[in-house]
Amino acid sequence: MKAKKMLSLIMAGAMVLSMTACGGDGGETASNNEDSNAEQATSVGDLIDSEVVADDDAEALDYTYGEGQTFHSNEPVTYSMMYSDHENYPYQENWLLWSAIEEKTNVTFDLTLIARTDYEDKKSVLINSGDSPYIIPKTYEEGKYVNGGQVVAVSDWVKYMPNYQKCVKDWGIDEYLKTQLQSDGKYYKLPGMWEAAGGGYSFMIRKDVFDAAGVDVTELEKTWTYEDFYEACKKVKEFTGCDYVISDASKGDCLINICAAEYGVNAGWGMGGGLQFDFDNLEFYYADTQDVMKDYLIFLNKMVKEGVLDPESFSQEDDTARAKFFNGETYAMTGNYQNLADYTSKMTDPEAELYMVVAPGGPAGLLQIENSKLENGIMIAQKALDELGEEGFIKMLRFVDWLWYSPEGQMLSLWGVEGETYTMDGENVVLNSDISFNGMNPDAEKKLNVDYGFGGGMFAYGGSNWLRTSKMTEGERSFNNRIYEYREDRPLIPPYMANEEESEELNLISTPLIDATKAWIQKFITGQADIETQWEAYKAELESLGVNTYVTQVNEIFQKNKSKLGY
């Protein structure tokens, strides 16, 4: 496996100006010179097609591919790929992952290794300078790369990817892909796809302590609201005498985000462009100036004032928050269900019982926090099409199709090689006893990701419900199932599909607007600003920053494009 480290930013890249997408509400940019193509599309059905094109002369191909078939090239082939090197399982040239892929497909990678912490910055430099490898995985935000012409509109090419198209069709992904459309009516990222939206983030609690305090969370969580959650935490505080029940990580951004989702407002990780969508009137509005936002802030400020939520949650380092939880100083914190097994192993109290509760509901309803079946995804460099030619480019896409979207490729990426890293017991995956992964075999000497390269973030995302749950502990599986049983889907906000010029204009308003909103949110929650006496001052500041103009412009853009989305 050929790999080279990217040690520094390419000097020429400093001369490249990359356009920034407008927030997280679907207003990514797209090339103006392709707008005319989008005008031909009048519905989402025209824009997202799950059909597969058959080859005119399949026997002449120098490779095998297809639904239910392993991709295999007759001749050895190497594809260049950008690689985010994770510090917890750093790249190794001799991983079984690489030889297993090569053995099955006759494909090897020419990797450009980039430290995970530098990946986004250096990815931008490589793409904008035209020096990017062909395959660009681990992409969360593609809009800022569209206008430069350095990445391919993959929606034009998915018709050659049978496994990808099967996922789209069988799992109802077309409505989710709609959220990725750019102003030209195309999308530029192959997303990881799940059969169903996952559990995502919620509160991880010390169930043993909540039980002892007389709080039956397993019954309450079915229909509880945040007010019910507050009352439950108050009982724990009274029972334990702790300073705070919750001291959170992520500078509070996770907690205020999952709470905001149930109030129908925006905050923390979910701040995005600050917009929500009125499905009755088909228009966007700025959520954080609405009366419900005031209610949301009053509630969170009450959590701080009453000693339930530690105000240091908004300033402390993540390790500090975790240490308080592990040591028994606090009894709840937010996390992803994948953290459950790891955190359980780090509790200092051997009797500690951790439990992921279903997140409380709020004024917006009893809603599932995670509302998308899509993950981060893969961009394909225009250079790949230019250098490989159309036939070679399609061949590479069909390799990508097998590795990332076929059940066989997904199983290999996650679990490895049957008989070497795992065995099957009926429908259950049994990890070899000398290998640990995701809380399984915690005392084993070897790790599936560290020592073998499987189960890592570059390849192992997306798949069927069975594949998702195959790597879960019983606690994690229970959390997912309870969410599906107790919560309703949260509506997907449509994109408004701003073009390059429109996005630039919106960014000039939205950047200071969002910054000011975030600052006020933290001050209101922690008590540095008084909600009752300074609410109007907050709204006045946002008005002076152009919030009304911002919303008006977004709605004008959406009205222009909504027919393309089927509205």
Image: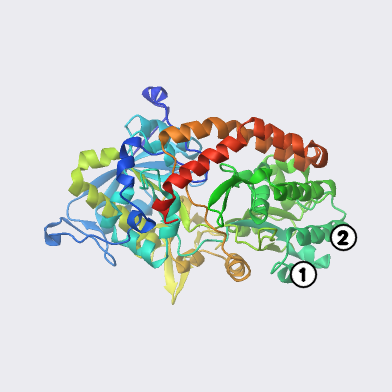
Q: Is residue 356 above or below residue 81?
A: below
Which is more N-terminal, label 1 or label 2? 1
* Residue named by callout 2: 239
Where residue 425 appears, as percent x and y from the top left, is 45, 75
Badge 2: how crowded within 10 Å, few (<14), some, or many (20+)? some
Which mark identifies residue 44?
Answer: none
Q: Residue furthest bottom?
A: 426
Picture quarter containing residue 476? bottom right
| Viewer-side residue, 565 vs 431 | 565
Q: CA distance from mark 2 to mark 1?
A: 14 Å
Q: Amino acid at mark 2?
A: Phe
Question: 143 or 103: nearer the eye?
Answer: 143
Asked whether, in this view, residue 471 is left or right of residue 240, the answer is left
For mark 1, does the 10 Å Cα neighbourhood hold few (<14), some (14 to 19), or many (20 or more) residues? few
Where does the C terminus fall, quadrant-wise? bottom left
**Quick check: 229 left or right of 53?**
right
Would you say residue 102 is visible in this rendering? no
- Residue at 37% across, 31% down: 128
The quadrant where residue 355 appears: bottom right
Which percent across, then down, holds residue 525? 76, 43
- Image coordinates for residue 236, horizontal then vertical, percent: 83, 59
Q: Image height check: is 14 above or below 517? A: above
Q: Nearer the viewer, mark 2 or mark 1?
A: 1
Which of these two is toward me, 180 or 137?
180
Residue 274 sits above or below residue 241 on the image: above
- Name the element at disc 1: loop
Q: Position of residue 464 (x, y in %)?
A: 44, 66
Give the amino acid at mark 1.
Asp
Residue that numbered label 1 is attached to: 216
Q: Residue at x 20, y 61 (%)?
A: 54
Q: Identify the element where label 2 is drawn.
A: helix
